[in-house]
Amino acid sequence: MTGKPPLDEVLALDDLHVTVHDGAATAVRGVSLSVAAGEIVGLVGESGSGKTLTCRAALGVLPKGCAVARGTVAFERLDVTGLSRRGWQRLHGTGMGAVFQDPASYLNPNLTVGSQLAEVLRVKQRLSRREARRRSIELLAAVGLHGPERVFHQIPAELSGGMLQRVMIAIAICCGPRLLIADEATTALDVTIQAEILELLRDLRDQRGLAVLFVSHDLAVIKELCDKIVVFYAGEVVESGPAAEIIERPRHPYTQALLRVASVGDFGRRELRVIPGQPPRVGADIAGCRFADRCQAAAGECRSGPVSLVPLSPAHQARCVRATDPELASSTDSASPGGASAAAELAAR
Amino acid sequence: MTAAVRKAGATGTAPLLAIAGVDVVLGRGWRANQVLSGVDLDIWPGQIVGLVGETGSGKTTLARTIVGLVKPRAGRVVFDGTDISGLRGAARKRERRSGHVQLVFQDPLRSLDPDLTVAEIVGEGLRIRGGLDAGQIRDRVTGALAKVGLDATLLERAPGQISGGQRQRVSIARALAAGPLLLLCDEPVSALDASNRNYILRLLADLRDSLHLPIVIISHDLSSLAGIADRVVVLYRGRIVEDGPVSRVFSAPRHPYTALLMASAPSVGDQGGQRLSVRQLRRTSADPPSPDGEGACVFAARCPFAAAVCARQPPLTLTTVPPGKGAVTTPADRWTAACHRHREWGELASQRPEHPQ
């Protein structure tokens, strides 16, 4: 990270709070993060940790009943938090694009994929019919689809999940956005296809300088792809920093636990590890650290008051009162469940 | 559950399930699509068999064929000594109601009835089968829930009121309540995060050990499967391309597709230096054209090592076990692969560039 010139900041979230159920509960609490041009930032955490709401707030498409209660969303250094619907629509496609988990549900099953891609180009860039078609075929080829002329005339049902996700990426980048938000974009794909999509995202970053915010619950996928990692737990950022540093020297006990349960690239018979306990309810009010109840290193000070992010290096920070404690830093491989059977451990929950 | 143990003890050498030469065609006329071709698969008691392959490879169709939801066009499915592929009418109904083979589905939120309570879901099959009074059903239900580590406080909850990991355990409890001899799990952990995924897999491993229950797990997560499975079966476009003990297959795969699946699996650790990279196993435009005519090897079109010999589909044949790794001692140790060049491609792959030029 050091030695490189400062990067252009494309997206910056500052102290973002998102409430759900018409303000009854706060699901995202004080999230700050930034994504620069040519950088892939990964958000990782369990389901319900607030990753998707954070993305939707950044895209200005929060579901009904949800609102940004505090904090700001800045796109290319411009505060877009209170933008009107028209304003967001102007940004969508041209400034920022998005890809989600289930590509088939975002495409009209009755229209050819080519017509749906060309439509975006005609509306957003006012291209002629012929020009939009030519550009669409170029884009389908650019996202690695073989025989783009044939694909242009196919309907979604004729394409595989991996091909549809490539079409969605083509639609997301067709108007040259600077930011791509991918929410669980490879979760439903086969591993071989997932590897190809990750490669495509890397190429887009390198060749177009695209900024990518990539969300996944799978730390292994995040590690393969991202330059920076942001770990979410129960609506908060608990650790963030350069990918290599987070993987090699995780300082928050939750990140350490995620690493223990992730795929390790080992294909041998082994003890599969689990994180005991359940995350707190969405919006639960907890005085101290939100992970304390599941943390093996938790002490009295963890529960007494709010824990703030502790800077560990210029780019690395962790929300743990013991973040600088050398004993905690080395505990990545300790705390083995000791071969207890799953049923015994489940019963203890 | 005692039934499972008794049967397993009685049939020490014969497989519990023997599938031979199964072809399955879905749809008719111009829509007809051959989904499985010449599938041979034996399953012994007390084994976890991992069934891997990509979308459309026929994993789910194979599971549906085993439970009798799909009728094969050719071949036999022999379960516990009875050919169940040819059963009709009352005999078929009797076989289904016996509950000998149970399926667990991928997405418990969709496969469990949202309007029923956990107790009703787990006991529903027993009620339909008949022969048990309400008290006996209640006992079987709480017994099955205890086996998956859920306590009786959840009995009156609806599927929507419990967590994803708990829901999948309810699906497994529902299957166990029927007293199965074989459990088929179709992508049981794909919808779960890593911690819950490991919970469920460990639970299945415990069930194998404590009940001697054979379990087939369909999954595309090779690494976590490797943690608990005894055997792995790799399907590619309706054919088994490799089948063998997990420890051997994953230490030196004999089919290039198995190697590609392993190389594609994301991991937080560094892949060992000897492992081949995706680049070495994926076809590029620079590779010579591969045979693609009728009857060619199903993987030839994606295989960088395809040669003239690959114009003919290779049969699943025994691979030789490297010296020092032990010989084939039991039928369950058999290791087969369907590749003409299974002795040569490894060497060719290691000569290919690891990174793009």
Image (cartoon, coloured by chain):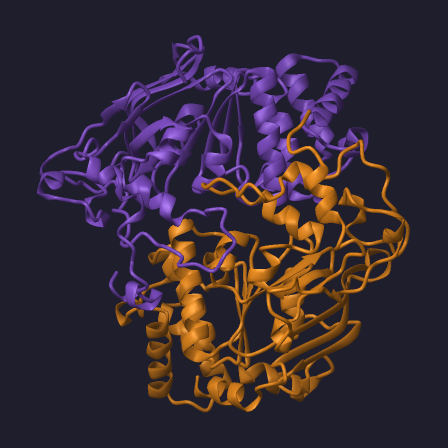
Chain colours: A purple, B orange
Whether residue B159 is visible: no
Residue A104's x, y, as percent?
62, 41
What residue lies at 44% left-to-right and 11% top-to-bottom? A4
Residue A342 is drawn in which quadrant?
bottom left
Q: Name the quadrant containing residue B162.
A: bottom left
Q: Quadrant of the N terminus of chain B?
A: bottom left
Q: How many marks?
A: 0
Image-based side of A221 in relation to A253, left or right: right
Q: Residue at x 32, y 35 (%)?
A: A250
Residue A34 in the image, given as x and y percentages of width and height: 38, 20
Q: Is residue A16 above or below residue A194?
A: above
- Identify the residue shown where x is 40% and y is 77%: B210
Counting from the top left corner in percent of width and height, residue A85 is at: 45, 20
Drawn side of residue A266 relative to residue B318, left or right: left
Q: Quadrant of the C terminus of chain B?
A: top right
Q: Nearer the viewer, residue A54 or A45?
A: A45
Relative image position of residue B5 (x, y in whole percent): 47, 86
The one of A196 and B89 positioned closer to us in this rendering: A196
Quadrant assignment, res A64: top left
Left or right of B297? Residue B218 is left
Which residue is drawn at the image coordinates 73% and 73% (left, top)? B71
> Which residue is most to the front?
B324
Residue in the foreground of this view, choosing between A210 and B159: A210
The reply to whether residue B182 is visible in this rendering is yes
